[in-house]
């Protein structure tokens, strides 16, 4: 019997939830972690919304599938039939969407048998719709995609339990009254996300099909704070990833293997007994679960192209090192790439936006986990720089990266600034 599949996704959450050690109130996510597997070093293929989601749901890099920017700003998949929902539907799954998907302006293009009606994409509206779907009769295995707007800005008004006096600002942001108050808004939002996840998991238990259902819970990229979302730092591309269900995703275990969200597509195919699509870039996580491998990748890759503006960058991350290359010279930050909020306002007023970015960066993640000391010009690391350059260039050739041919124009009519 093929398992059901539930894909739970959130907006801008990074790893700032209780299972990763942060003191925010996410008991349902903690329960999921204790019943499944937590991947401590999981990364998205992009630190922006639509490209990250498109990569996860096609198993290919954003530049390979055409998703170089945001779907609501004029970017789209080259071939919608590469989407996981189309693949599973063709294989006999009933496919449904509840809430946010952010890969296209027209979700009917993505192969869902059913798009559940919801008044908004907030967890309070999406979770009940998903729960009703789970309570219905299922004559065939299903794929249910559940997308929550949380924890995207604007944040809800903090409640008493989100007391900023006792919160810690995110690691890349200075600790101040303003940033703690900003974090209180995130705390309120992530509690709503947790409530929504809990409603879906409880409905799964009530339906009596939890043991036959693979639950995948992740997010698109890092928090919408300065130096996080829209950057190729670990705080930008590092994501929560928890899985529970068939395939060995049980027992409350933790994996420190370096994994990419691109690994989810081949994992689902293997668990569902489906021949993997041509051109998938990830690898099935099942070899980690059965113990046949301790490590899946020696490096993961990510990219940034368009958000509000054009900021082409690529990165390669190994166990120890991170190499980032910028393909557009900038002597300032693109402030529009950081969502409006108290933390951005606090830093921008103190000159943060006037900082440029070096064209090449190398960081020793073991000795410099916050990526603050660029080693690219350090003669002692010249061989490492050379090796990381080679890795990046080989990956770009393998995936036919359009940056190899120069600046990449936006589609006609796209709503972006700074197009080449």
Image (spheres, rainbow, N blue to C red):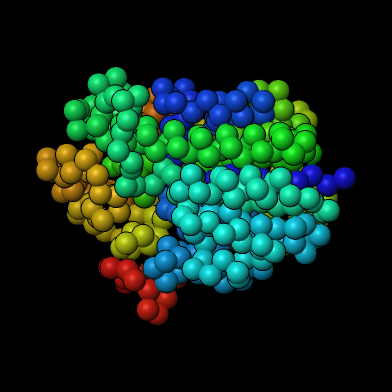
Instruction: Name the residue: 77% across, 36% down.
Output: 208
Q: Along the horizontal axis of the image, is 290 left or right of 420?
A: right
Please name whichever residue, 399 or 26, is drawn nearer the observer in this view of the structure: 26
Residue at 38 percent across and 62 percent down: it is 306
Where is residue 333 shown, x and y percent of the image? 23, 51
When the figure is inspected, residue 338 is found, relative to residue 182, above or below; the finding is below
* Quadrant of the image containing the C terminus: bottom left
Front in this rendered view, residue 11 or 40? 11
Location of the N terminus by quadrant is top right
| Viewer-nearest residue: 387 or 414 | 414
Q: Position of residue 380 (x, y in %)?
A: 37, 32
The answer to whether any part of residue 184 appears in the image is yes
Q: How many marks?
A: 0
Instruction: State the residue in front, 346 or 92.
Output: 92
Locate residue 172: give its quadrant: top left
In this orientation, does residue 84 appear?
no
- Residue that extends furthest to the bottom in the rendered view of this protein: 412
Report the residue at 44% width, 33% height from top: 191
Left of 64 or right of it: where is 283? right
Left or right of residue 254: residue 303? left
- Residue 29, located in which quarter of the rendered image? top right
Q: Where in the figure is residue 234, as x and y percent of width and height? A: 42, 38
Left or right: where 260 falls relative to 266: left
Q: Position of residue 211 (x, y in %)?
A: 77, 34
- Residue drawn at (49%, 28%) of the image: 26
Outermost residue, top direction? 166
């Amino acid at each position: 019997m093929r398992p059901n599949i539930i894909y739970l996704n959130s907006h801008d959450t990074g790893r700032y939830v209780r299972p990763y050690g942060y003191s925010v109130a996410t008991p349902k996510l903690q329960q999921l972690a204790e019943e499944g597997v937590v991947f401590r070093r999981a990364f998205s293929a992009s630190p922006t919304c639509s490209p990250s989601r498109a990569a996860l749901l096609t198993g290919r890099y954003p530049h390979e599938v055409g998703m170089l920017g945001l779907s609501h700003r004029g970017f789209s998949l080259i071939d919608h039939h590469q989407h996981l929902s189309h693949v599973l539907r063709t294989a006999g799954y009933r496919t449904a969407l509840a809430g946010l998907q952010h890969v296209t302006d027209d979700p009917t293009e993505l192969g869902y048998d059913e798009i559940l009606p919801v008044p908004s994409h907030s967890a309070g509206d999406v979770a009940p719709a998903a729960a009703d779907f789970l309570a219905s009769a299922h004559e065939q295995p299903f794929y249910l995609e559940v997308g929550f707007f949380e924890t995207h800005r604007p944040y809800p008004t903090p409640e008493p339990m989100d007391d900023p006096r006792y919160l810690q600002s995110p690691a890349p942001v200075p600790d101040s009254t303003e940033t703690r108050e900003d974090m209180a808004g995130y705390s309120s939002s992530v509690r709503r996300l947790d409530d929504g996840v809990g409603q879906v998991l409880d409905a799964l238990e009530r339906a009596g099909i939890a043991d036959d259902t693979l639950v995948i819970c992740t997010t698109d990229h890092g928090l919408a704070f300065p130096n996080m979302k829209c950057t190729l730092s670990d705080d930008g591309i590092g994501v929560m990833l928890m899985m529970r269900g068939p395939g060995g995703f049980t027992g409350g275990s933790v994996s420190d293997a370096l994994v990419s969200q691109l690994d989810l597509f081949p994992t689902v195919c293997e668990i569902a007994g489906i021949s993997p699509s041509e051109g998938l870039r990830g690898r099935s996580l099942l070899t980690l679960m059965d113990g046949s491998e301790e490590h899946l990748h020696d490096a993961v890759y990510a990219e940034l192209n368009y958000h509000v503006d054009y900021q082409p960058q690529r990165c390669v991350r190994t166990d120890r090192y991170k190499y980032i290359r910028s393909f557009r010279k900038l002597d300032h930050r693109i402030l529009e790439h950081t969502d409006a909020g108290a933390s951005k306002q606090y830093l921008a007023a103190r000159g943060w936006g006037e900082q440029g970015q070096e064209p090449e960066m190398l960081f020793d993640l073991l000795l410099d986990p916050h990526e603050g000391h660029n080693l690219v010009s350090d003669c002692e690391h010249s061989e490492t720089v050379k090796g990381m350059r080679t890795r990046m260039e080989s990956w770009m050739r393998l995936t036919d990266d359009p940056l190899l041919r120069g600046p990449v124009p936006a589609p006609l009519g796209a709503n972006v600034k700074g197009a080449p």
